[in-house]
Amino acid sequence: MMMKNQSADLKLLNQAQFGDEDKFMALYDCYSSLVKRLWQRYYITELEFEDWCQEAQLVLLKVIYSYDGRDIHQFSGFYKQSLVNRLLDLYRSQQANKRIPVEQLELLGGSSNEELLEGENSPEGIVCCHQSIEEIIRISSPFERRVLSMIVTGKSIKNVCRELHCSKRQVQSSLSRSRTKLVRILTGE
């Protein structure tokens, strides 16, 4: 990383802020080891190193134009945190593509909800159901447990949000995570 000669590094930063492409690349080269270290630490499948370098250059460009301080140490920390945030955004984006839309969940089971409700209530089925409920309670976070218990008792998402003082998105995300966990339990993953 930089910081060997603060005044020279600050001058390089200022020149990059004024659009000097060579100085921008020189500034990027100063942080290339950081870029590589973060790519290795936060490995994301299907993100080639060259693609990550392009992402890091875009992040640097945004950081350069939004940074107005005079301390190169603050700039370095700001850039590093911005890179970590970008990696986390890329990871979340990749994970979001793996989610199964609610409309397609029915296709996984092969049975409609009515068929499941009308099915036999064998002792083995009841025991399996109780075990699944115990397991989902065990592996859920306290927030997910509260949301699940309120939804199961018939409360609407809007009422859950109001009572737990949280956003609709938080409740929906909690339900989505719980649904994923339940599918894993039921499929034995």
Image (cartoon, grey):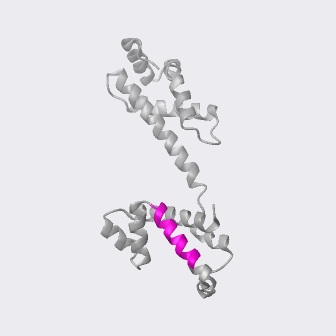
Q: Main secondary structure of the magenta part?
A: helix
How far from the left and from the top, in percent, is residue 46? Answer: 65, 42
Q: Residue at 38% across / 17% down in the picture? A: 10
Q: Residue at 58% across / 65% down in the picture? A: 185
Nearest to the observer: residue 110 or residue 66: 110
How far from the left and from the top, in percent, is residue 164? Answer: 32, 66
Q: Quadrant of residue 100?
A: bottom right
How far from the left and from the top, in percent, is residue 149? Answer: 41, 72
- Provide the residue span drawn in magenta: 127-140
How many numbered marks appear? 0
Q: Residue at 53% across / 20% down in the picture? A: 29
When the figure is inspected, residue 124 is found, relative to residue 96, above or below; the finding is below
Q: Does residue 106 appear to the left or right of 12 in the view shown?
A: right
Residue 130 within the segment the image draws in magenta: yes
Nearest to the observer: residue 165 or residue 10: 165
Q: Residue at 31% across / 69% down in the picture? A: 162
How far from the left and from the top, in percent, is residue 60? Answer: 47, 30
When the figure is inspected, residue 105 is found, relative to residue 90, above or below; the finding is below
- Specify whether residue 84 is in view: yes
Q: Quadrant of residue 81?
A: top left
When the figure is inspected, residue 18 is found, relative to residue 185, above or below; the finding is above
Single out the residue that lies furthest toward the right. 110
Q: Quadrant of residue 67?
A: top left
Q: Quadrant of the C terminus?
A: bottom right
- Specify whether residue 113 is in view: no
Nearest to the observer: residue 166 or residue 130: 130
